[in-house]
Amino acid sequence: EKRILSGIKPSGELNIGGFAGALSQFVRLQKEYTGFFFVPDLHAITVPQDPKELRERSRHIAALYIAAGVDPQKNAIFMQSHVSAHAELGWIMETISHFGEMSRMTQFKEKSEGKDGVSAALFTYPALMAADILLYQATHVPVGEDQKQHLELTRDLAIRFNNRFGDTFTLPEPITEELGARIMGLDDPSKKMSKSNPNGNSYVMMLDSADVIRKKFSRAVTDSDATVRYDWENKPAVSNLIEIYSIFSHLSIAEIEQRYVGLGYGAFKKDLAEVVINELAPIQEKYAEIVNSEQLDVILKEGATKAAHVANQTLTKVKTALGFLLP
Ligand code: TYM
């Protein structure tokens, strides 16, 4: 059986980078795989969160999964904190993890650098992420480029556990798409598109209105060469825009280049905005219907039941292997 598991943190509203790298993959892959899609709220609190905002964003992310087309009948959609096995196995994976390998995680270095009051949980976060994945015996994990290091660590921890305590965990593989695994900021193609950028024009949010999307793309940086050509080395800003165009239009890079031969960036950026607006419109519409509905609560409840059933089986296996007395 092929199983995928993945999640998007409710620490900010979702931008089109997370859609390109993760959510659009969930939708595509659900045809072939059994899917577990969760909202990692335990991960979100590794940095301070306002409780009211956390509650809203948790619904936001879960509703976006469904609005984008993740089928709640076919997959388990759930909150991480609703399945207590995550926290339990997270602790156990911490005991398997080494301080040195955790210290090498680039995301921790980036997020902690120059900050006061960095939580211990931000440091041990990858052990919890490993638990998320291993609990479901996931064979594949669709993620953007920035999560690949955490996936490698997950594999290392699984191998270490299996060697010490006997075959317990399936080794997961990351799935990253060639296009969209690393969408960059519209203001600076050397930085990942991220909500944490203080410049609001650097990212497009999933729920941005058509006018805001037009404005943001019209302000996107390009270069002085004025040809729509895909070349990350020499034309990173334009290449980033072409990737976004390709993901949202389902046209190939070559088709897009072809379409704009002899045309300037103005026409290209204008069309790009429309392509994104068209693809987001039905998602935004569905989102509005679902985000405050009771149906969403029902889906999350059923998802948690399905997920807990699988997760608890693995947890019992782990506890037995470790030598814990079973109640
Ligand atoms: P998070 O919440 O930061 O991001 C969610 C997913 O979106 C991808 N992503 C991007 N992809 C392309 N371009 C971008 N600019 C961009 N920004 C974000 C991320 O790579 C990710 O796939 N640790 C995870 C959440 C998590 C998880 C898991 C994921 C917790 N447990 C288990 C998979 C499996 C995170 O912080 O992602």
Image: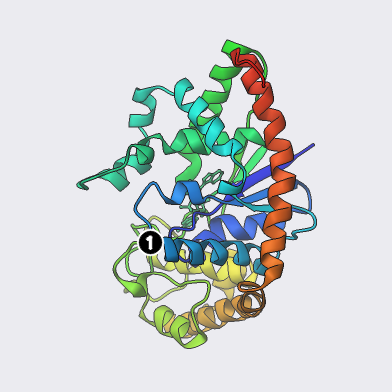
Q: Amino acid at mark 1?
A: Asp
In the rendered image, residue 307, in percent from the top left (x then y), is placed at: 70, 44
In this view, 241 is above or below 232: below
In this view, 83 is above or below 137: below
Given residues 208 and 323, the one toward you in this image is 323
What's the residue at 67%, 57% (across, down)? Answer: 300
Q: Residues within 10 Å of mark 1 (few under 14, many from 20)?
A: few
In the rendered image, residue 219, in percent from the top left (x then y), is placed at: 36, 80
Given residues 196 and 253, the one toward you in this image is 196
Callout 1: SS: loop
Given residues 304 and 24, the one toward you in this image is 304
In the rendered image, residue 84, in percent from the top left (x then y), is placed at: 59, 40
In this rendering, does residue 14 appear at all? no
In this rendering, does residue 213 appear at all? yes
Pointer 1 residue: 50
Image quadrant holding the C terminus, namely top right
Residue at the front extreme of this rendering = 327
In the rendered image, residue 12, in percent from the top left (x then y), is placed at: 43, 62
What's the residue at 37%, 43% (across, down)? Answer: 107
Image quadrant holding the N terminus, namely top right
Which quarter of the figure has residue 224? bottom left
